[in-house]
Image (cartoon, rainbow, N blue to C red):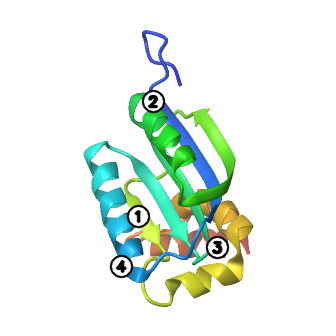
Amino acid sequence: MPNRSGAISLVEFSYVSEATSELPPSALLRLEAQTRRFNLEHGLTGELRFDGRSFTQVLEGCWSAIMPLSARILTDRRHGSISISAFRPILARRFTTWSSVGFGVGEAAALRSVGAAGNLRFLPLVPCLPLEGDAEDARDTVRATT
């Protein structure tokens, strides 16, 4: 949303894309490490998922960081048939950090069974799921609604 000067401060960019070629494990690990480092250095939060065929990512951060990164992603030859799901101002972040799923052994196959559309629908829920310390609160909420 706009800050006091009227400039947009936080934005969300999310997309699904097909990998243009098969990426060997070493290339995937390099990509994940570079992405993690870049996002940490630029204060970006969100999640990147890779199921062996498609990338699904939600990024949150300052307009000045997201704009050039989104342009870089959209022109990256590793991405084909990119479908932008969201590019919008946000009031607050839903993610507290940036993470990746599908880059470890066996993770890609599990994500592939859900499919890119399923992964994209799941991503917005990640910040709402109970994390460490929230499990008791979540159980109380479930008990109260049943």
Looking at the image, tell me whether mark 2 or mark 4 is earlier in sequence order.
4
Vertical arrangement, residue 7 with respect to residue 102, above or below: above
Residue linked to disc 2: 63
Residue 144: % across, % down: 66, 70
Task: Name the residue type under label 4.
Answer: Ser
Q: Which mark is residue 99?
A: 1
Task: Name the residue type under label 2.
Answer: Trp
CA separation, marks 1 and 4? 18 Å
Q: Quadrant of residue 5?
A: top left
Q: Quadrant of residue 28?
A: bottom left
**2 vs 3, front mark:** 2
- Neighbour tally class for label 1: few under 14, some 14-19, many 20 plus, Cα within 10 Å: some
CA separation, marks 2 and 3? 37 Å
Asked if marks 2 and 3 touch (Cβ < 8 Å), the reply is: no
Residue linked to disc 4: 26
CA separation, marks 4 and 3? 42 Å
Residue pictured at 69% horizontal, 84% vertical:
113
